[in-house]
Image: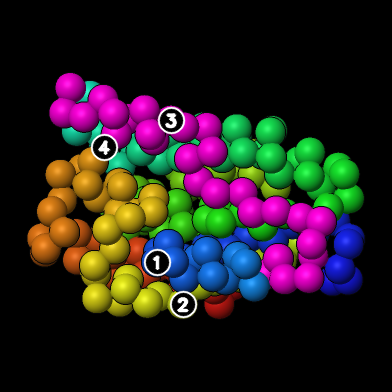
């Protein structure tokens, strides 16, 4: 793609630092563009502030919130940027959420239906696993979700979920 043209690039991965680095590289010389980050709506920040009084959400609930946040990003960040003829990088986008959902045991059909509203990007990129391979993700959507679901950073459940999500993303990157 040529610099200055509208382009919609998705960057997915579990390691937030790697996702951001890949997003910046994808934006590259497209100076008239920007990066759309998860929790642009603030819904997850509100959940974090609620603390224990909000209870422990299920993976399904967290993905419903992710979809709501993505709908917000599409309406207020992604589509307007593309309409202005600029490039936008969504970091992370749908594949990260789907990988989390599959790793948490949710059915592929439900996840496909949930994110049906999300347009296909013109280009897909995947951030290298980095810390995800070791199961030590503590920030970003995956880290937040694990924390909210009560998985401690050193728990076997968290390591398994991160490892399974990493495998799901590897499969997605080959499609």
Rounded to the nearest angstrom, the CA distance separating label 4 from label 2 is: 27 Å
Left or right: 80 as drawn, with respect to 60? right
Rounded to the nearest angstrom, the CA distance separating label 1 from label 4 is: 22 Å
Residue 82 visible from this viewpoint:
yes
In the picture, residue 154 is in which quadrant? bottom left
Quarter holding the C terminus? Answer: bottom right
Q: Earlier in the sequence, mark 4 or mark 2?
A: 4
Rounded to the nearest angstrom, the CA distance separating label 3 from label 2 is: 27 Å
Q: Position of residue 30 (x, y in %)?
A: 79, 65
Say which mark, if any, is on residue 58.
Answer: 4
Q: Residue under circle 2?
A: 128
Quarter holding the N terminus? Answer: bottom right
Which residue shows up at 22% across the image and 47% down it?
Answer: 147
Rounded to the nearest angstrom, the CA distance separating label 3 from label 4 is: 15 Å
Rounded to the nearest angstrom, the CA distance separating label 2 from label 1 is: 8 Å
- Residue 44 falls inside the magenta stretch: yes
């Amino acid at each position: 793609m040529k610099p200055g043209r509208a382009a919609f690039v998705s960057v997915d991965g579990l390691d937030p630092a790697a996702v951001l680095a890949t997003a910046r590289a994808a934006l590259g010389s497209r100076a008239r563009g920007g990066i759309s980050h998860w929790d642009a709506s603030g819904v997850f920040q509100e959940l974090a502030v609620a603390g224990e009084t909000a209870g422990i959400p299920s993976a399904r609930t967290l993905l419903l919130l992710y979809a709501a946040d993505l709908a917000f990003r599409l309406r207020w960040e992604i589509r307007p940027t593309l309409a202005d003829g600029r490039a936008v990088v969504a970091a992370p986008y749908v594949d990260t959420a789907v990988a989390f959902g599959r790793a948490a045991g949710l059915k592929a059909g439900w996840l496909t239906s949930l994110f049906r509203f999300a347009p296909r990007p013109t280009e897909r990129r995947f951030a290298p696993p980095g810390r995800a391979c070791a199961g030590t993700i503590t920030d970003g959507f995956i880290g937040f979700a694990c924390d909210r679901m009560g998985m401690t950073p050193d728990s076997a459940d968290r390591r398994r979920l991160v490892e399974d999500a990493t495998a799901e993303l590897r499969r997605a990157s080959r499609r």
